[in-house]
Image (cartoon, rainbow, N blue to C red):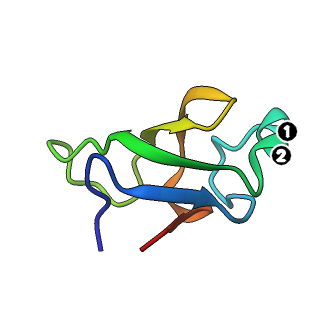
């Protein structure tokens, strides 16, 4: 299921994507929301922009994110 702008998320695991950087380990367990899901690209492997609580806005791989319902 593709992420939508405003979806609440949690960074729940390290990504297997090559874009994952060691500093991103600090984001594990952090909550936030989707700010730009890149729906125009329509690529499930694309990085998406998220705003993380007290960590700022970052572009992260989707396989590290969990949708909070």
Q: For numbered disc 2, what is the local secondary structure?
A: helix
From the top left corner, tell me how far across and down residue 28 is, in percent: 77, 54
Task: Using residue 1 as the reference point, say whether residue 17 is left or right of it.
Answer: right
Q: Residue furthest left?
A: 40
Check contact, mark 2 vs mark 1: CB within 8 A.
yes
Nearest the eye: 57 or 20: 57
Where is residue 20, by image quadrant? top right
Q: For numbered disc 1, what is the local secondary structure?
A: helix
How many C-alpha atoms fall within 10 Å of the one at disc 1: few (<14), some, or many (≥20)? few
Nearest the eye: 19 or 68: 68
From the top left corner, tell me how far across and down residue 19 is, in percent: 63, 41
Task: Using residue 42 as the reference point, say whether residue 43 is left or right of it.
Answer: right
Q: Residue at x 60, y 59 (%)?
A: 10
Q: Which mark is residue 7?
A: none
Q: Which mark is residue 25?
A: 2
Q: Residue at x 42, y 74 (%)?
A: 69
From the top left corner, tell me how far across and down residue 58 is, in percent: 55, 30
Nearest the eye: 62 or 18: 62
The residue under label 1 is: 22
Q: Nearer the viewer, mark 2 or mark 1?
A: 2
Alpha carbons under labels 2 and 1: distance apart: 6 Å
From the top left corner, tell me how far across and down residue 1 is, in percent: 30, 74
Where is residue 23, by image quadrant? top right
Task: Using residue 37 as the reference point, say whether residue 12 is left or right of it.
Answer: right
């Amino acid at each position: 299921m593709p992420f939508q702008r405003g979806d609440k998320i949690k960074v729940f695991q390290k990504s297997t994507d090559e874009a994952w950087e060691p500093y991103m380990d600090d984001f594990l367990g952090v909550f936030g929301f989707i700010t730009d899901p890149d729906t125009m690209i329509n690529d499930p492997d694309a990085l998406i922009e998220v705003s993380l609580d007290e960590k700022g806005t970052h572009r992260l791989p989707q396989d590290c994110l969990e949708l909070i319902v």
